[in-house]
Image (cartoon, helix red, strand yellow):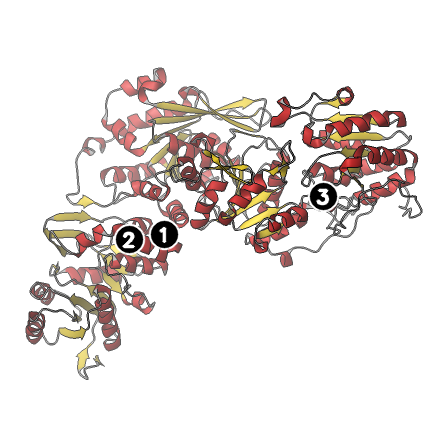
Amino acid sequence: MSTQTDEGRQTEEIVVGVVIPLFKHSVLIADAVSALVAQRAEFRFVVVIVNDGCPFADSMTQVEALRSLRPDLIRVVARPNGGLSAARNTGIDFLLRNFPSLKAIYFLDSDNLLRPTALARAYRALREHGDASWIYPNIDMYGVRRNYDYCGPYLPLRHLIQNICEAGSLVHRRVFDDGIRFDESMRLGFEDWDFWLSAMARGHRGLHEPMFGFRYRHRGESMLTHSKRATEIIAAHMRAKHETIMAPRALLELEARTAPRFVIFLVDVNRVVFGLDALDLTAALPLEDAEQALWRALFAPSASHFPPYFLFSTSLAVRRLAEDGLLSWVGFEAEKVLREKNFVGFKFEACDGPSIEVSPGGVIGDCSVFAVRQYLIRGLILDKTSTWLIKLLSEPNEVGVAVQTIRFSKVRFRPVAPSLLVCLGFMSQIQKWRDSPYASSLPLRWIWRQPCLPTQELHLEMRRHFEGATLFCPPRTGRRNIGFVLRVASFGGVERVAHNVARELTALGAAVHLFLIGARDLTLPSEFRGVYASISFLDAEGPVEWDFDSQYLGTNLPSTFDSNAAIHRLVAALSWLDVVVNHHSGALNAAAGALRRHGVVTATYQHVVDETPARRQHGHPMLALAFEHGYDYVICVSEQLKRWMHASGVPADKLTHVPNAPGHRLARTKQNAVLEARETRSGTSLRALYLGRLDRQKGVDRLAEIVSGSLDLGVRWRIVGETVTDEAADQAPLPQILCRFKEPAVFDDDALVEIMAWADVMVLMSDYEGSPLSILEALRLGVIVIATNVGALSESIRSGENGFLVEPGEAARQTLAILRDLTIDAPLRRRIAREAIHVRTWEDSVRPLAAIFGLRSPEDAPPADEEPSFPSLRPPVREAEAPRPKVAVAPSAKMRRATVISPLDPTRDAVTAR
């Protein structure tokens, strides 16, 4: 077969083309071409010398002499000087244009050499491995002698961190057909690395050929040494150009798929799990299979991957951690502590308090998880003594042991391993490896070349993006990963909003991860168990520094200086996420900008503008304004707060309104029972409730005046709550009249429903508010709310229709008048109560948020439910003739009727929030 060239000659089919750029190597090129002439190949190849405007006169003399010797083999192309990349691209285009039969192109620099079988070996490997797009060699340098070994399977992760492929590689034609070329703007070096990354981004992969036969001429001063001087400049350019694949988030995801950082040895079933995201332990490998991989990695770390961190545990303990979402955090905590300690243990206990609590301390022999690094495993195998074994149990501080105790709620706690089982299983495994016939050869070095970067150290290289901070090992969810960051998790209003929003986002296909900064305990009601894909405690990293010399509109700011190591640690822990939502973590504000630069979508959730005792505005909205540039979105619980944030400088496109809904789900049967009982309740005595914090902000003095004045009306009171804010020590004692009716605070959902079922009226006399969940929970059960017209309460309460708003200056007088009318006017009470139950659901509230986070769009959501009706033993009557209370009530903005709960609709699911 023959083809027609640009030169008008007929030539046989060409399979491989070799491109040699020529610039100032007019003598050395003779060696390079001679090596090509000596190639023993069973296929036709052609050599293209690209004269890149070489200024030396003898360059063309040398080239012409070489061409005259083998005119069938050598072609010459001349061009103005444009640099190495331009010369290579010229050769590529010449070959593709002139030789349609071309299968591959090899790049040989004019001062390098090939052994006689190099092209044949490389092309055979390319032909036999159809998934490989290029074949790359070891680097054997002569002149200044260096030898580098790049053996082992091709790992894109390693190639993203270190250039393991020389330009002197054989590249399949399909790479060039995809339009991939050398970057002609890169003239400082590493243009070959850039070329491989461009190919990798298009799905191409390389293959190592250990017997390639490539020889690299290394001199004291060369382009390579010049490139090393400009490494940082080149690296910054490449990171910007290849941001999609070189971003830390992409590296972490690639690490999880191809080079897991953790391996779990299940000592009770003699099986092994790679990674931290496997709930299905049936997929675990037999221990014998994993041991073969371990020995390969110990003998040749760069040729075979085995995770650098070992966890020894039992199948029950691992399943327990995975079900509670703690397995990824345990790995993160273990890696962090192992930077200073040799051994880390995690002990499980039961507790009477929160759902999950973490604290340092414990006995290593009682631990259900035992962690150690691979390099220490190697040392323990070589050390034949038992000294460390004895000290591990008797003198743990002598061998560097740290223990963390994880306490689970007693209700859900169950033992997972007998005492000493995991520790003894670890020791037994070490002894087994010591007795292996491979152990005696472990001290020997089997590879004479210098190995490339071992895969076990790749995560250490990735830490450089975060000033050396420990990286979180992300679970492989296959979904959009959204991180919720909270300062505390005692199940207050902010936490309840977060949990409800997390549940809705999870239902829409997201994987929501909870991170607690500043807390080592979590109170998570049973209805939210399973909502979070993972749960992590990050406060042990050390507190974020606050710059008390800097304030924004009177609110202190966290330090943003690069020296603030805690900020780097936060970014390292969160940068793998697709979205990060800040739920009132002041410290996270300082990290938001860095997260955004790493490609994370950032949002801050705002609930209320706080006030100081001097009535000056401050708090988390001020922090959001100070760090607004670091956030993509600002989420507001009310239209009022949204308008305030916009007026304060936040662009409208960043603002999203996500109105609150009731803080907990309520079964329809229970709701119906409460509403039926309220409708048929006999007697005229009015039951009034205060539920919440008993702090200055809540207007306790006004409340005391109302309680005192209403006793003559026969109103029965329950005051449920505690004083909990930081100002508690400075404020006046609780008025005696309130102490008379005071009950402890209640957090249990059933107890809250019982209290609200008892009440006819709920009174809230706050100085300022956001959008309290308790108001919505009360309305849902037909409780008439009387509240001061502050904050966003007018968005939930339409005064005179579904509740009452009173002005702060006249709150006591107006409230007493309303209580008097409600006491004597049963039809008014029924009408307001029936209208009150029209309450939105979280499903509707979260739709706009889901849309901006890339989840289901509002158009895809199911149609809204029909309007509810108040349950009754008789057909409901709209008592339009019922007189309005003869008091002055504050006007309120009309709240759009949201999708509502329909208690008696039999077509609805059993839980109202769905």
Q: Which mark is residue 233?
A: 2
Q: Disc 3 vs disc 1: Cβ atoms closer than 8 Å?
A: no
Q: Amino acid at mark 1?
A: Met
Q: Position of residue 812 (x, y in %)?
A: 81, 32
Q: Mark 2 and mark 3: span between their CA atoms?
A: 58 Å
Q: With 525 as the anchor, is 806 left or right in this view?
A: right
Q: Out of 41 and 799, give the one closest to the viewer.
A: 799
Residue at 34% from the left image edge and 67% from the top image edge: 178
Dot in front, 3 or 1:
1
Q: Mark 1 and mark 2: span between their CA atoms?
A: 15 Å
For the question of whether residue 673 can be seen, the reply is: no
Q: Mark 3 and mark 1: span between their CA atoms?
A: 45 Å
**What secondary structure is marked by label 2?**
helix
Q: Position of residue 768 (x, y in %)?
A: 69, 37
Q: Which mark is residue 246?
A: 1
Which quadrant of the rendered structure holds the N terminus? Answer: bottom left
Which badge, 2 or 3, comes first in the chain's sequence?
A: 2
Q: Amino acid at mark 3?
A: Thr
Dot in front, 2 or 3:
2
Q: With 841 as the anchor, is 462 left or right in this view?
A: left
Q: Which mark is residue 847?
A: none
Q: Position of residue 446 (x, y in %)?
A: 17, 40
